[in-house]
Amino acid sequence: QVQLVESGGGSVQAGGSLRLSCAATGQTLHTFYMAWFRQLPDQGPGKAYEGVAAIDLDGKTTYAESVKGRFTISQDSTKNFLYLQMDNLKPEDSAMYYCAAVPQFNSIAALRDDLDWDRYNLWGSGTQVIVSS
């Protein structure tokens, strides 16, 4: 059973940078689609998550318009870690950030876009990012 654990969140001033990490335990992620999502402060529990960035099996990346040019998603060569480099952070980036994954051959994965939250069936518990102005 794959488990995802995020780290790297924290408090930073606007214009600063953070690097989020997602560690996979129990199985490597060679055959998983991966993504980062966030839940904004004004969205309560149970609200949909906002897709931030996704990476597929051959390294193709997808970004939300709001983070293009500022955020970079990547994986290490072992496929045990997923990263999100966040530069030029803005107060509106403040959120709980989640790592998500779905196996390559999941039937739902083929029917959803890369940044659709319901494409993914494995989630970490999140890491908080706070950006002050």
Image (cartoon, rainbow, N blue to C red):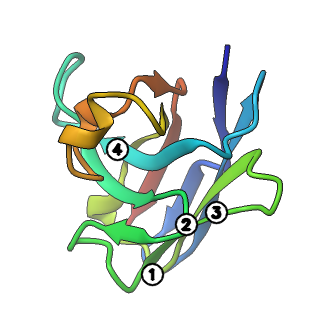
Quadrant of image for the N terminus: top right
* Residue 99 located left or right of residue 39: right
Q: Amino acid at mark 2?
A: Asp
**Residue under pointer 2:** 58
**Residue under pointer 3:** 19
Q: Amino acid at mark 1?
A: Asn
**Residue under pointer 1:** 88
Q: Position of residue 71 (x, y in %)?
A: 45, 73
For marks 4 and 1, the one nearer the N-term is 4
Q: Position of residue 49 (x, y in %)?
A: 25, 37
**Residue under pointer 4:** 38
Q: Residue at x 45, y 81 (%)?
A: 88
Res. 131 image quadrant: bottom left
SS at mark 2? loop
Q: Are marks 1 and 3 in contact (CB under 8 Å)?
A: no
For marks 2 and 3, the one nearer the N-term is 3
